[in-house]
Amino acid sequence: MNHGFITFEGIDGAGKSSHIEALAQWLRARGREVLLTREPGGTALAERLRELLLHQPMDALTESLLVFAARRDHLRQVIEPALARGTTVLCDRFTDATFAYQGGGRGFDGQVLVQLESWVQQGRQPDVTLWFDLPPAVAAQRRAAARAADRFESEDETFFTRVREGYAARAAAAPGRFIRIDALQPREAVWAQIAQSLEERGW
């Protein structure tokens, strides 16, 4: 039985958040203890950094440093202790988002991100990453209908096209970890793809 670390990734509006709670319930029904968390965030310090990231203007290096600072605290305070207890951790975004948003969207130096990833995570990677892939134009329509935009969500479609390409590059580099979810499908079909994919991997 897998007890591990599952991350949810995708551009804003792809529908990740509506499925993370469903997966938690699905895993609990199979007898697993489950922790739901998010990035940036998950600790008091990381949530304060999240507010800065979403609402204060800054350059891509500052964004990246803040994201990894939040991630370091999150790993030490929440994720690693939970995994050590045998708890399954479901996290709404993790490092793939940094490579997609800061690396892809902002065009920031990927080698700097690789170095920060190495320092902060010390080899820790998700066991499975569910990538909710959706055309940026569709994601924009969904976001506009759902909520007011933050600093990232207000970026243009070209930005989100680069973000999507950033996710695709991460998926290509780690095909054993990534499961691409076709987020253009109806919600029930998306959930069916998630459940089937995880069952095939022994979850």
Image (cartoon, rainbow, N blue to C red):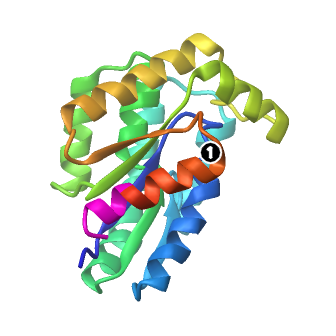
**Picture coordinates of residue 80 (x, y %)?**
30, 72
Q: Amino acid under label 1? A: Gly
Q: In this rendering, is residue 195 above or below 64?
A: below
Residue at 36%, 70% (x, y): give it. 79
SS assignment at label 1: loop
Q: Nearer the viewer, residue 107 or 132?
A: 132
Residue under label 1, please give it: 15
**Picture coordinates of residue 81 (x, y %)?**
32, 79
Is residue 69 something that shows in the picture? Answer: yes
Q: In the image, 159: left or right of 8?
A: right
Residue at 72%, 35% (x, y): give it. 150
Magenta span includes 202: yes
Q: Which of 200 and 114 is in front in this view?
A: 200
Q: Residues in magenta? A: 197-203
Is residue 70 something that shows in the picture? Answer: no
**Picture coordinates of residue 38 (x, y %)?**
52, 58
Residue at 51%, 67% (x, y): give it. 23
**Picture coordinates of residue 75 (x, y %)?**
34, 64
Residue 185: which quarter of the image? top right
Q: For the residue carrying disc 1, how many other residues have a C-alpha within 10 Å: few (<14), some (14-19), or many (20+)?
A: many
Magenta span includes 153: no
Residue 178: which quarter of the image? top left
Q: In which quarter of the image is the C terminus?
A: bottom left
